[in-house]
Amino acid sequence: MTDRDVVDRVGNLFERAVIRLRRRRPHHKIPYATTIKGAPAVRIMYLVRPFLGKARQLQIDRAISSWQLRRSGRRPRTDGDASLPHVTPGAVAASDLFTVQGASQEACDRAWLAGLLEGEGSFLASWDGQSSYPVIKVEMCEQDVVERVADLLNTRLWVEAARTERWRPPYVAQIAGHHAAGWMGTLRPYMGLRRTAAIDAALAVYNPIRLTEVPPICVVPGCERPHRSRGLCNTHYCRSSRPQDRQVRGLHELVARPRQGSRPEDRASALIRSSWSRVPTCPVSALA
């Protein structure tokens, strides 16, 4: 990796040194690496295997099988751990790890998600022309891994077309807005310097629009349809993204961001003074 602080943390966990590698191209950043081999590496593979995807589990099984074949006929080195030759992937269950570490399933899922997003995720600030909102996005070719991310983030999964004929199609999981901001705050303590800076940048420009009092019906004068989001019904909410309906977009901000300490009747009078009070109302049937 090119993030020195992340590789240093892995090196401390492995109790191994971190080395600096050569750039592959002159414009590339400097990569860093740390390596663990032999019996200590096999033990770590056994421990992390239950948390990995199918592709990584297959790589671990192949690596351990080849290591055992090469060492057949003599007793493996255990580095002081006599239990290592008897450890199998099935013997090191996820529940056993949780019991030893004293962590809950939620904490382990959160740590797994943080590790994946550190390497494969994106923390962004998306602009819609007037406001900015945070976005967390994961795009990988391993479907089972992205499915787990989507399940933890409570979002959906979709597949995109492959960029070239030789590449596999990527799977994407993404959240945005208030949900993404909450997860950024939760995952920030786990992240390295670069991801932390990206999270801070996304949250710094985020000015959420939240209704303090959800109205029962749409706030557009003359509309009696039930409220859907941001003070608008489904029809006006869909129209708020159109360039010709910018007044609808500004209306929900008037309701969603009242002045501090203002009362509902004050907001109602401000609504009457808005530009919408001068727009001729049309019947609901005309908006269908």
Image (spheres, rainbow, N blue to C red):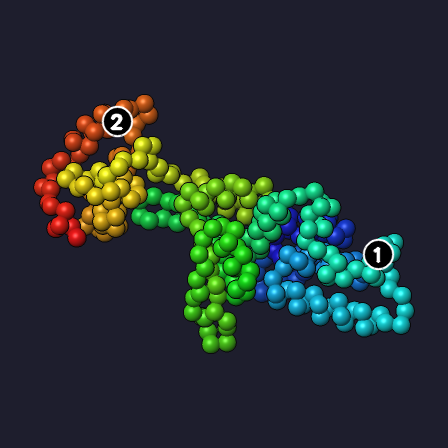
The residue under label 1 is 83
Residue at the far right: name it.
Answer: 74
Q: Which residue is drawn at 71% across and 67% down?
A: 61
Q: Is residue 81 left or right of residue 222?
A: right
Taking depth in this image into account, of 49 and 185 the one nearest to the observer is 49
Residue 142, x across and y down, in percent: 54, 65
Compared with 283, 166 (above or below) is below
Q: Residue at x 58, y 54 (%)?
A: 116
One can see residue 72 in this view:
yes
Circle 2 residue: 264
Q: Which residue is drawn at 63% across and 59% down?
A: 52
Left or right, 105 with reference to 235 = right
Q: Distance between the residues labelled 1 and 2?
A: 69 Å
Q: What residue type is labelled 2?
A: Pro
Q: Which mark is residue 229?
A: none
State which quarter of the image contains the N terminus: bottom right
Q: Where is residue 191 in the image (x, y as percent from the top left)?
A: 58, 46
Q: In which quarter of the image is residue 77?
A: bottom right
